[in-house]
């Protein structure tokens, strides 16, 4: 049985995530020399802390893990409510500050817990067949549980993370066989609601969107500053980069925050297009392999977990890379495995462990009518 699990495991996923983590460490090492490598050292510690979570997530049968998802979901909702009463950091109430240098972001670990719970709920709703999700009351039940954490995260406000949740929710719905009529209705609602949402966005979010829509008119010294510096950094790197510790925007402090939101810009400036192109390919491999794990999972629960994880990785990859080169609005979304951050790193390692777990137990292909 052990040999069969090892043989079935999609090891490419682990290899890709390890390469991305190493690239991230190299970039952080260069980007943090002015602070005596403080965040680099912390990232190494977080990687060590994250490894046991990866191992446990890969070894314990995911069907056993899912049994505890209801309790975990309730705890996460409680944490997301509790964090709204904390002092704001950078304009958002998203973190529990544990010590001066240590904080915890419940919305990060909430991603995987919400995916586990929604996979559990979806499986229960489809106990009589995949078509059951198209019954209005069952679809409404799923959406109610799905939207609660999203609304709480929007309240923080953290729009980037909220969209990551929404992406995972939609990926699960699509793989569950949602009827096309609901997709059409959803698109119509989005078209109608978007102008209303836009008109009621807070100033900082509105400025970011306006910078994206009108980059040439944005004040390069104020709201357009971060995007301008990011684009300068990526462009300056050309094919092979300016070299570690040699990036002008990175080392002279023009790029901010360079260890989290704009780590891709650091890599672009100091390692060049070859490195950023490689990273993009690695993420594409990671997402496609995650989708393949979903397609070949032994049951619907495993499929929904894997496709939800694929949605998270897809959004983070697309948004972070897109915002650093001006193709998408800046939202403060980190680059998985590469950006600095303990909460996100643990969550990402758990996601990889679950993908390995699901792939090792696969027996048949699904996504068929």
Image: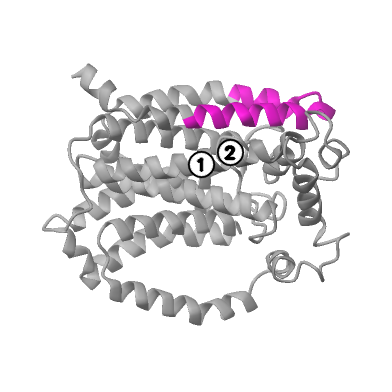
Percent position of residue 127, x then y = 14, 54
Residue that label 2 marks: 279
Magenta part, dominant SS: helix
Asked if residue 219 lies left or right of residue 120, the reply is right
Tag 1–tag 2 contact (CB < 8 Å): yes
Q: Residue at left 53%, top 23%?
A: 49
Indicate whether 53 appears above or below 90.
above
The magenta-colored residue range is: 16-45
Label 2: which secondary element: helix
Picture quarter with the C terminus: bottom left
Asked if residue 60 lies left or right of residue 154, the reply is left
Percent position of residue 20, x then y = 56, 32
Q: Which mark is residue 283?
A: 1
- The image quarter in which residue 113 lies: top left
Q: Which one is in front, 271 or 144?
A: 271
Percent position of residue 116, x then y = 34, 45
Percent position of residue 104, x then y = 58, 38
């Amino acid at each position: 049985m052990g040999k069969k699990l090892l043989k079935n495991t999609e090891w490419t996923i682990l290899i890709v995530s390890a390469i991305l983590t190493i690239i991230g460490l190299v970039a952080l090492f260069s980007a943090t020399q002015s602070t005596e490598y403080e965040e680099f050292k912390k990232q190494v510690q977080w990687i060590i802390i994250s490894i046991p979570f990866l191992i446990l997530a890969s070894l314990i049968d995911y069907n056993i893990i899912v049994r505890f998802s209801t309790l975990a979901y309730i705890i996460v909702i409680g944490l997301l409510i509790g964090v709204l009463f904390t002092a704001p950091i950078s304009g958002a109430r998203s973190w529990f500050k544990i010590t001066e240098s240590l904080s915890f972001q419940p919305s990060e670990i909430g991603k995987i817990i919400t995916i586990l719970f929604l996979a559990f709920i979806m499986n229960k709703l489809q106990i009589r067949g995949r078509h059951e999700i198209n019954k209005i009351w069952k679809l409404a039940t799923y959406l109610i549980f799905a939207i609660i954490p999203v609304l709480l995260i929007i309240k923080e406000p953290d729009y980037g993370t909220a969209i990551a949740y929404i992406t995972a929710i939609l990926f699960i719905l699509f793989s569950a066989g949602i009827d096309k009529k609901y997709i059409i209705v959803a698109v119509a609602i989005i078209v109608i609601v978007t102008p209303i949402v836009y008109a009621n966005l807070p100033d900082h979010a509105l400025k970011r969107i306006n910078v994206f829509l009108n980059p040439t008119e944005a004040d390069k010294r104020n709201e357009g500053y971060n995007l301008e510096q990011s684009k300068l950094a990526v462009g300056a790197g050309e094919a092979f980069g300016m070299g570690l510790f040699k990036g002008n925007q990175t080392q002279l402090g023009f790029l901010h925050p360079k260890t989290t939101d704009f780590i891709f810009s650091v890599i672009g400036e100091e390692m060049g297009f070859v490195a950023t192109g490689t990273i993009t390919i690695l993420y594409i491999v990671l997402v496609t392999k995650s989708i393949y794990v979903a397609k070949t999972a032994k049951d619907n629960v495993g499929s929904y977990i894997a496709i939800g994880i694929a949605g998270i990785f897809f959004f983070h990859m697309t948004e972070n890379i897109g915002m650093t080169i001006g193709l998408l609005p800046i939202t403060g979304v980190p680059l998985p495995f590469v950006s600095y951050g303990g909460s996100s790193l643990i969550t990402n390692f758990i996601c990889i462990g679950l993908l390995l777990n699901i792939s090792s137990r696969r027996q048949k292909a699904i996504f068929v009518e």
